[in-house]
Amino acid sequence: MTKYEKQIYEIVNTSESHLTAEQVFWKLKQIYPSVSQATVYNNLNKLYAAGLIRRVSVEGFPDRYDCIARHDHFVCRKCGRLTDICLEDLTPSLKKQIDGEFFSYDLKIFHICTECRKKESETEK
Amino acid sequence: MTKYEKQIYEIVNTSESHLTAEQVFWKLKQIYPSVSQATVYNNLNKLYAAGLIRRVSVEGFPDRYDCIARHDHFVCRKCGRLTDICLEDLTPSLKKQIDGEFFSYDLKIFHICTECRKKESETEK
DNA sequence: AAATAAATTTAGAATAATTCTAAAAAGAGT
DNA sequence: ACTCTTTTTAGAATTATTCTAAATTTATTT
């Protein structure tokens, strides 16, 4: 692991939020000001391919990166905001239902986040 | 509903595969040769916002559109191919586990598709 | 049916996210 | 130190999607 790879792994794993590649880039730039975007994309892809980080795609928004610890996501249909939620682990149930092998699963629950709900009710007034 | 909106709805709902906006565009062009890309994007967004079609995002691949009939997806980690699979409906379980309201959920199972598995074993030879 | 208003479509430019390229730099192995 | 491999860099290129403003179509009013 190169210093960049290690640092990107750290950033993704310690961040509360779900960072986009661009946000990872800006965080990394604070530590290594000369780093380039391509390095961030390269390493995020590498870490993702190695199964060390999670990549979360939300319809209409750029991909975000997350730790691999088992959990699910709320997705706001309005603003795309991701919120963590830990639901029952589906692995045993999926193993029963699915014939072949699989790596992992991704469960997203669509809702409207608190912020967007506030905005909505404000506009109604 | 305009003729384009109706036709796009038809194309998305009758297609076996999971079409990208571009693929919808080419199919629509066979019927209305003068149609433009923007019309396709406009109408897909409209239909999606109205809850008439599903939009499926796959990490690293363009969004695809699908019918809203309840079902889940296999996602190939290599080529992004989507395959339908109908697993147990999670709605009752989610309602129990989740406090607030939600619209719908999206469950993706990551695996390596048959085609990619073939390619893999061929390269190994 | 003509006039007006509203919504939709069009082509092309613009933007955003990501990948590619080829050269430079860094690291590892003899 | 010298060679080989890997990683990084900057910027160009690509891809997916949205925006823009004019043209067209559709709906509404007279």
Image: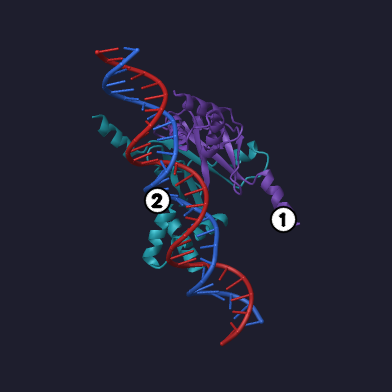
Chain colours: A cyan, B purple, C blue, D red
Q: Residue under mark 2: which chain is it in?
A: A
Task: Say if residue B31 shows up in the picture.
Answer: yes
Q: Quadrant of the C terminus of chain B?
A: bottom right
Mark toward the viewer: 2 or 1: 1
Residue A17's disc number? 2
Disc 1 residue type (three-letter)? Thr
Residue A44's disc number? none
Disc 2 residue type (three-letter)? Ser
Q: Are marks 2 and 1 in contact (CB under 8 Å)?
A: no
Residue B123's disc number? 1
Q: Quadrant of the N terminus of chain B?
A: top left
Query: In the displayed structure, does residue B122 sit left or right of residue D18?
Result: right
Report which quarter residue B123 is drawn in.
bottom right
Element on which disc 1 rests: helix
- Quick check: A36 above or below C16? below
What residue lies at 48% left-to-right and 47% top-to-bottom? A56
Report which quarter residue B23 is drawn in.
top right
Q: Nearer the viewer, residue B58 or A100?
A: B58
